[in-house]
Image (tube, rainbow, N blue to C red):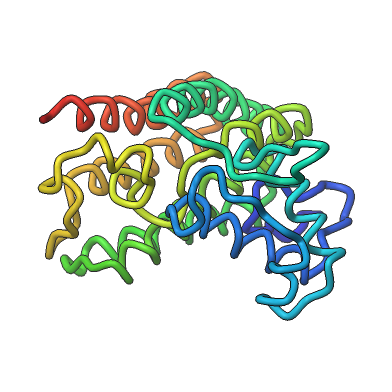
Amino acid sequence: MARSTPSDPYARDDGQRAEPATTTVLTRVRELIVTGQIAAGARLAAESIAQELGVSRTPVRSALAVLAVEGLVSYHVNRGYMVRDIRLRDILDAIEARAVLESRACGLSVDYGWAAEELEQLQATVAEAGTIIADGAWSEEIERRWYKLNRDFHSMIVRVSRNMAIRSAIRMTVIYPVFGDVARLCPAVAACVPMRHRTIPAAPPAHILESQADHQRILDAVVAEDAPRAEQEMLAHVMRSRDRLAALATRR
């Protein structure tokens, strides 16, 4: 029997989920860090965060421990948790590592087999994202909606691989934004990208159209139960995002 698919690709498979308060803190602090609202080198005091978010210190400490595993913060015995100084090279390397891990997860998901309910959910996610693009409009809000579906798409594939080692390894590569265009939102990338490439266009940009087409090809391979093709398509898909960032950073 298929289990419901969580939005977090790193949720545990044994049915145990993080407490709601921890999830809330984790999501909020992660977003503040990757969008630069909390600067590199800033100290993350559990007491201050707990007070600001209206929670106890326990879920804050749990969330900070997860962020340390993800590579967004570092822990020092005498100074506590601090935001890491993430560079463009770090992000490109992380995406490349994720490409290898996630492509293998995609192939394993086909080998393992998709339950009917899981496959229907994957198809619905691709279709909904396609509808957003077909509408022809683009804005910060629309971008965020599309990227939420993008995250759900990748999350489902990694989860259905049923490989906890891969899922744990992928956690170490999530050091760039998943809330929108990394070239616009991540300070480490934006600092290297000309302003003209950081503006939000009125219509879906080319890299979104390309990504949506990639998702459809990956889905087609999954439906066809073609594991090698699914794996190859996923590898090419994730690497395209890396190549785009590297190319944008050289356009001075």
Task: Please state if 229 lies on the left or on the right of 165 as rendered.
Answer: left
Give the percent coordinates (x, y) of residue 38: 51, 56
Q: Residue drawn at (23%, 42%), measured in percent from left and top?
A: 207
Give the percent coordinates (x, y) of residue 125: 47, 59
Q: Residue drawn at (58%, 55%), measured in percent from left and top?
A: 30
102, above or below 220, in the image = above
Task: Please state if 224 lies on the left or on the right of 24 as rendered.
Answer: left
177, above or below 231, in the image = below
74, above or below 12, in the image = above
Q: Most extreme residue toward the front, as rendered?
A: 78
Task: Please state if 244 lies on the left or on the right of 16 as rendered.
Answer: left
- Look at the image and tell me in which quarter the N terminus lies: bottom right
Q: Most extreme residue toward the bottom, as rendered?
A: 54
Task: Please state if 50 lies on the left or on the right of 186 as rendered.
Answer: right
Residue situated in front as seen by the camera: 45 or 28? 45
Q: Residue drawn at (43%, 39%), measured in percent from left and top?
A: 220
Give the percent coordinates (x, y) of residue 103: 53, 26
Residue situated in front as seen by the camera: 111 or 243? 243
Residue situated in front as seen by the camera: 92 or 39? 39
167, above or below 26, in the image = above
Residue situated in front as seen by the camera: 169 or 105? 169
Residue 69 lies in quadrant: top right
Q: Residue drawn at (54%, 54%), measured in percent from left and top?
A: 152
How many callouts does the rendering have? 0
- Look at the image and tell me in which quarter the C terminus lies: top left
Give the percent coordinates (x, y) of residue 100: 53, 20
